[in-house]
Amino acid sequence: MRRFVLIAVPYFWLLALFLVPFVIVFKIALSDAALAIPPYMPTMKDGLSAMFSQLDFENFVFLTEDDLYWKAYLSSLRIAFISTVLTLLFGYPIAYAMARAPHEWRATLMMLIILPFWTSFLIRVYAWIGILSTEGLLNRFLFWIGAISEPLTILNTSTAVYIGIVYTYIPFMILPIYAALERLDASLIEAAEDLGCSRMKAFWLITIPLSKGGIVAGCFLVFIPALGEFVIPSLLGGSGTLMIGKVLFEEFFSNRDWPVASAVAVILLLILIVPIILFQRNEQRQQEAEG
Amino acid sequence: MVETVFAPWDDPNTAPLISFKNVTKRFGDFVAIDDLSLDIFEREFFALLGPSGCGKTTMMRMLAGFENPTSGSMSLSGRDIAGIPPNKRAVNMMFQSYALFPHLSVWENIAFGLRRDGVAKDVLNARVEEMLKLTRLEKFGRRKPHQISGGQRQRVALARSLAKAPKLLLLDEPLGALDKKLRQDTQFELMDIQEQTGTTFVIVTHDQEEAMTVASRVAVMDEGRIIQVATPEKIYEAPNSVYVADFIGDVNILTGPVKAVGADTYSLNFGGKEPVTAACDRTFTEGETTHLAIRPEKIGIHAERPDGSNAVQGKVLDIAYLGNLSTYHVQLPSGQIIKAQTANTRRISRRAFTWEDPVWVSWSATAGVLLDQ
Amino acid sequence: MNRLSPFNVVSLTFGFAFLYLPMLILVIYSFNKSKLVTVWAGFSTKWYGELLSNDAFLDAAWVTLKVAVISSSIATVLGTMAAYTLVRGGRFFGRTLFSGMIYAPLVMPEVITGLSLLLLFIGVGMDRGVMTIVLAHTTFSMCFVSVVVSSRLATFDRSLEEAALDLGASPFEAFRLITLPIIAPAVVSGWLLAFTLSLDDLVIASFATGPSATTLPMKIWSSVRLGVSPEINALSSILIGLVASGVIIASLISKRHSVRIQQEERAAGRFENN
């Protein structure tokens, strides 16, 4: 009996507050907009059969017709992908250096990587506004050292979004890679060098493949949320940068078109299902490898 | 004066404390315990001995209640215990890793089981103090497990498992983590405590020396089956199979067809120059392949052919010097190696035999055991 | 591997500089007399004063704190239950779905979770306000708690639970008296994680809230949409200071604790034959 309660309570909570909402999103994606509260039609009050007969794919068709949406999806994919690659390029060396650091330092280094994570994400992104704007600190610094004569426009471009995403998500890339590298047996590298590998080669042939699990986990932990990011493109990207999270938010709050917003969400979810399943598979494989 | 020997298994009027009847345990396709039947009596110090994977730990976990048999029945004091959860059995276990609760003091660890039973405060205190005294841990009651040494932790685990005075105590490889000297001392301590408290102990071990030292009876297991259950002497001197003979101590096996040559006497042709004679009260048919098992210490080594039967010639291939004993590996013309062990009654420089020496090894007709498997 | 190669030293230095410079800049400029980032007009704490007398900010902070404490506490209980189920539950009906529901919110974009929850609240006709934010935060936080606790439970020595059962404890007693005290640090970090996520959340709160409830992130958002604001700099510095002290104190405590344990173990080992 107790076992049932143990499983049931969180299970039903999640069913009610996670699964059911998704079903509702699907349903509304198939509904029509209305000047009513709630701003969609049909509602439950119209009766079940009436409801089902009035549902249609109109909104989804609309998404394909209007340029904005599929451009936003593609742009989001592109930005998320590039940001993930950049985060990996910057994050791996840091994780590697942490894994090679003397043991006494490691706890402190971990703490230093995690500390920004505990600080407000919104505030840290906001800080970049002051740095990247045309009168901001970066331009003033470059000007001062004579690297540029004209201020660079970084804010309100996709470059700022890349910087923002890398900055915010880099701990999520560093931690899984660090964990994988820490578990790596140093004697494997020594064995490789003993057998004639150069330092560089040993790195490419041994270290990288063995940290693959961490790399994959880190990439998913960046790519999937970055795809639906809202705050960073809104604060740093300006109107020129299209990201689907921003589009969804605006559809919902500014245009009050809930059915279209829901349809946008459904498509985004469908795009994400494959990476999410791959991420879960990777995690399971990792757990089995350790267990 | 006749000494009463402790042997309840020989007495048909004594009911066993634990009884396994045709117990089988399967994990998916893997058969861990195969149609096993066994009786264990009160006040025994019973050893389950066997290699890894033979099923001894599974048997123990079934007694403790952490596994249930797939078929067959188990009873404790005559009552069927299948389905009774571990917290409701009068059985306690001493875990291989000790499983001491790290956040509780030694005192609280020992008191844990008594508290679960709602024992009255003064009775509980007295009992815990008694256990601390029994295991010589009086000064360490306040300490936490990480503040005491490995040997002390082992004693806490023992005290904790005895606190509730269980009918049956299960010990899962209890001495594995101790170094040799400590292990030997602890073996005798365990035997003393077992006699003092009168508890039935069942110990699981892969160390045959340990089993032989502490146990009143040993069950040699392999692949989920019990091969032989007997007292240590019988296991050593009268194994029922080559497996048991080989598992315990060192043994020489000569294999070949037999022929009856007298009352309870057989002649075995193992491929040497002459056949050897062995006394055996079992019956074998003529020509049946049997194995003669002889312990190395029963084999004498001589420079010249000695009198009596069972003398074989060979060459000293190797000598294993163990301080008090030497084991001579003698190679016979057939290629087989016989191990002969003698005490080093003389100092090494005056040793009679050395490598490459031609020697004779001999044993009496009653020195070995004839086995059919 | 006692010395770091120059490449590694450079990586670490740049890495940490990259992470910490923006925060440092915020703190410095919160003391800037001038509103602008570009001009340093001298040291001043006036923005802190303005911030602390701004009622709207203080109300929002209070709401945010309330929501964070309540939602993280409930999330910790639910998340621990879920973790126990996942690690020890074995096979049960609907296990794949359950595990999917636990892991999905970790990577789901917040706009989707937020949207779906709002549609739910409207659908059942619930009044939106503090309560709905709490429900929303509890839901996604419990998944994070579950991940933290289940990773600890997975490495937990089961023989300790078996020993408790063997000595007469019921399964629930074994959990309460043995497992829980030992995994407590993981449960506490789960709570802290849930607390931080709730404190920091903008998107989901925006969806789930009603006219009466404004959280601090929402207040910050409406301010920064218009550009740099010195009060926000002050607020940021306060938050950064609080978090930094919290994290540093926590690591110092845990470091001292583990050093002490190590010393005690070593001392015990020396008296082996006692």
Image (cartoon, coloured by chain):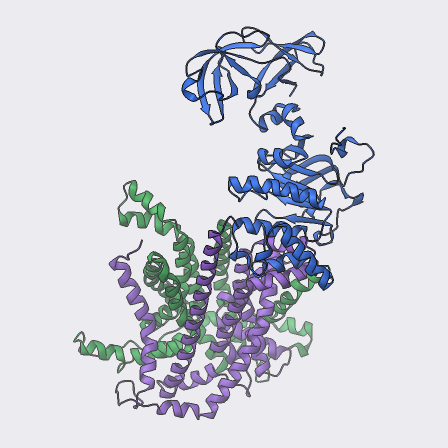
Image coords of residue C89 (percent x, y): 63, 57
Q: Is residue A254 above or below residue A180?
A: below
The front one of C50 and B259 is B259
The front one of A98 and B337 is B337
Q: Residue most toward the right?
A: B13
Q: Is residue C225 above or below residue B6?
A: below
Image coords of residue A208 (percent x, y): 35, 52
Residue sitting at x 52%, y 40%:
B181
Q: How many marks?
A: 0
Q: Which chain is blue?
A: B
Residue sitting at x 42%, y 16%:
B354
* Quadrant in which residue B195 is drawn: top right
* Quadrant in which residue A242 is drawn: bottom left
- Indicate left or right for B205 with C50 as reference: right
Q: Colour of chain C?
A: purple
Q: Residue most toward the front?
A: B1
- Indicate left or right for B295 with A66 as reference: right
Image coords of residue A38 (percent x, y): 59, 82
Image coords of residue B79 (percent x, y): 80, 45
Q: Note whether residue A19 is visible.
A: no
- Indicate left or right for B160 with A245 as reference: right
Residue sitting at x 36%, y 74%:
A241
Q: Which chain is green?
A: A
The front one of A61 and C95 is C95
Q: Is residue B336 above or below residue B100?
A: above
Q: Note whether residue A153 is visible.
A: yes
